[in-house]
Amino acid sequence: MEVHSDRGVHRFAVFTAGCTFFLLAAGALVTSNDAGLAVPDWPLSYGSLLPPMVGGIRYEHGHRMFAAFVGLLTVILAIWLWRVETRRWVRTFGWVALGLVVAQGLLGGLTVKLFLPPSVSSAHATLAQLFFASVLSLALFTGNWWQKDLPQFDDPGSPRLRALAVATSVVILLQIVLGAIFRHHGFGIVPHLIGAGVVTLMVVWTGGTVRRRFPQAPALRRGVKWLHSFFGLQILLGGAAWWAVRAAADAPQPVPLTVWITVAHVVVGALLFGSSVLLALCSFRLVRPAGALAVESRAAGATP
């Protein structure tokens, strides 16, 4: 039986996800412009809601204002889901997303209060990615595609696509953590480069698995295309960002070209992680769990 979603809440979830993407860009602008301590107090900015928007203040305070807007959107989304959504787990996930954005705001304040310690700043950046993935997931869950009758596929290979897709998302998230620690001067580039190699292996492995085992699953194949596209772009931007940072190492102020390349590297990393999460979710929606076929066969054999 097909179930039609509430189109309003789905569109609002998509809008919230889009705004969250731009919030990630705003946060990356703060770090790339060395503006993290341009406003030394929190939650107000120089004791005001509207400080002079000059210098680094426009990046840091602009980021805070946009974060408050996304937080408000998430409150509305969680309440809307609670009122109209019939699936309890989706309603619960809406509250989880709200909890993530609240925790993200508190971590943002803490990183200012503690003068940008690498551990807290990196946790702040990582939680932002998790929140983005959670809102993307809600946009998927509330759409018609997720709720309608879909063909189910068996996975005869090993490792199972479900496990492989989840592992790919985890590896990409860990790479994001390494990148955040590097950007916040926690350690050098080597761990991040090693992580890039592991991500390359997992992305190629996952894509090849989908192509070989699920040629008749267009949603999975489309998900792999997005995953590979963002991965290829991310590799190019990573190399460009490393070159730009080294070329501008002696510059007294952040160089605009370096700023925009590093910001692009961060936001495309978010898209890469988001696409891996959506691919993993689609694999759970379309691929039967391990052992499901054996259980069905035994049940059929027991039927007189």
Image (cartoon, rainbow, N blue to C red):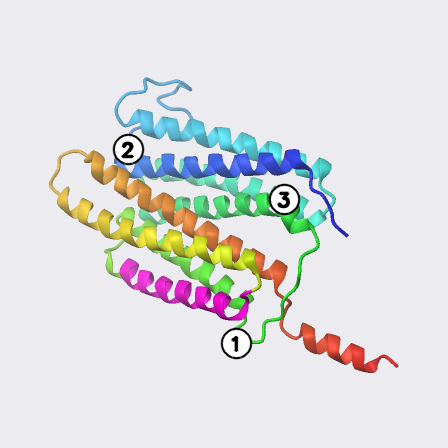
Q: CA distance from mark 2 to mark 1?
A: 48 Å
Please tell me how crowded label 3 is: few (under 14), some (14-19), or many (20+) other residues with Cα within 10 Å.
many
The answer to whether one can see residue 79 in this image is no
Q: Position of residue 25 (x, y in %)?
A: 37, 37
Q: Position of residue 176 (x, y in %)?
A: 37, 53
Task: Indicate whether residue 165 is drawn in magenta.
Answer: no
Q: Position of residue 100 (x, y in %)?
A: 52, 43
Image point 58% across, 43% down: which residue? Answer: 139
Q: CA distance from mark 3 to mark 2?
A: 38 Å
As rendered, which of 268 and 218 lies closer to the eye?
218
As rendered, which of 73 and 219 lies closer to the eye?
219
Label 2 sits on what residue type? Ala
| Mark toward the viewer: 3 or 2 | 3
Mark 1 = which residue? 158
Left/right of residue 255 with respect to residue 160 in the rendered view: left
The answer to whether one can see residue 293 in this image is yes
| SS under mark 3 | loop
Please tell me how crowded label 1 is: few (under 14), some (14-19), or many (20+) other residues with Cα within 10 Å.
few
Label 1 sits on what residue type? Ser
| SS under mark 2 | loop
Mark 2 = which residue? 35
Mark 3 = which residue? 143
User: Which quarter shows the C terminus?
Assistant: bottom right
Asked where in the image residue 187 lies, by quadrant, the reply is bottom left
Write the start and end of the magenta stretch as one range. Answer: 191-215
